[in-house]
Image (tube, rainbow, N blue to C red):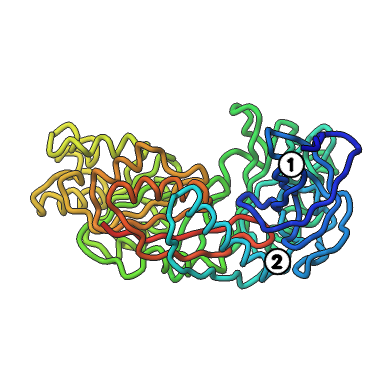
Amino acid sequence: MEQINANTDETFEVVIERILPGGLGLAHADSRTVMVALAAPGDRLRVRADRVKGSVAFASIVEILEPASVRVEPPCPYFGRCGGCNFQQLSYPAQLAAKIEIIRDCLRRLGGIEDVPAFEITPAANEWHYRARAQWQYASVRRWLGYFEANSREVCDVAECAVLVPELQRELESLREQMTKDELPDEARHFRAVVGDEGVSVAAGVRSPSVSEGKHRDHATEIVRTVAGERYQLNANSFFQTNLDLVAALSDSALGDARGETAIELYSGVGLFTVPLARRFANVIAVEDDAAASDFARRNLADAGLSNAEVVNEDVADWLENVECGGRAQRRERCFGSAEQSASSDPIQSAVYAGALQKGAALPGTLQIDFLLLDPPRTGAESRVISGIIRLKPKRVCYVSCDPATLARDLKKLIAGGYSINSIQAFDMFPQTHHVETVVHLVA
């Protein structure tokens, strides 16, 4: 076998077969697997190996010998350096097709699911200028503001971003103008921004938590975002879906026709799914480990006039383990508060506690859970979380995921625990990137 050497001037020719999870193009050369960044399926390329790991070479394009029919000219001048987008070389239909195949590949290869149900991907209404939430990296010494370069912690200085909504583009320009006037705090390492119905919330992430003075503080201005008639309070430090054009459709898909007595939501954030769940179920328990997000969720429920949902600020895995203890008083207090606390605390907690008691059980571990929804971070759910879900035995589970690989890993465990896939739906929340949102419904 001819040796492919990394970090040399040697080049070799490949043909890209398909796009892999992670967005790299797959090819083969000299009995090795070659993964090529920024490739298109069908490209004939001259590439150089940047890194070799065992029988796999990671390569970059030196020359496009014959472009694929789906290859287009990337409009962004930062494409190839900026790590934000890695699909601009693909036509939009090719991006959607690649994402469907990425999900299928992960479910088959990582999830062990041989017969993946047929599913569709909902395209974005806007291929460009869709991103309503962003984080810009700041290199104060060089006075650069933008995104990290691909596979690097170096900042790519970006003046105009093709995927930002106009409000965020104007905010980026404002920050850059302040940067040129030395008005940004040198201690800042990044700036987070999110668009509301009116205005933009911006927060500076600083190297020292003691640095909080000045125009951009850790505590960001609050905004309101309306989705399908529901109002959500949040700020720049809150997680919220990036593509507002698809949020309502995503929520509709996640909830489906679910209705009943009791629902649990894990990783509930500021309550994007909690509020509509509370309109469909008699009792809802939402679990979120971030205190600020939990506070926003409680306020959003109260503003919606909903008193049948409780937000528990606790680590999701810990909470699931705690509810296994049945009706013991100390666990009741941990999950719902004591009877005295419930009587004197906010109406949301009181209503859920009372609702559970009326069903003859004080803890979700002894209730029949009609519906459980989880929307974990990109890393997926911990093994303890999946085990806890299986022990709770909800009738139906909805898993909302932004990473097909961790989704497949977790689905494999849920299927082994007695669940089967009822439906899959994908949403292109992140055009021009390999990322994709997937909603999977499972039944016991």
In the image shown, does 355 or 130 lie closer to the viewer?
Answer: 130
Is 191 on the left or on the right of 252, as rendered? right
Report the number of discs. Answer: 2
Of residues 223 and 98, the one nearer the viewer is 98
Would you say 337 lies left or right of 430 here? left
Secondary element under disc 2, as helix, strand or loop, is loop
Frontmost residue, 82 versus 134: 82
Residue lying at the far front in this picture: please name it.
Answer: 1
Q: Disc 2 or 1, which lies upstream in sequence? A: 1
Q: Is residue 280 above or below residue 135?
A: below
Which mark, residue 58? Answer: 1
Q: Is residue 395 positioned above or below 331 on the image?
A: below
Q: Residues within 10 Å of mark 1 (few under 14, many from 20)?
A: many
Q: Position of residue 7 (x, y in %)?
A: 84, 34
Q: Position of residue 102 (x, y in %)?
A: 58, 57
Residue denoted by label 2: 128
Cα–Cα span, label 2 and label 1: 29 Å
Q: Nearer the viewer, mark 2 or mark 1?
A: 1
Q: Quadrant of the N terminus?
A: top right
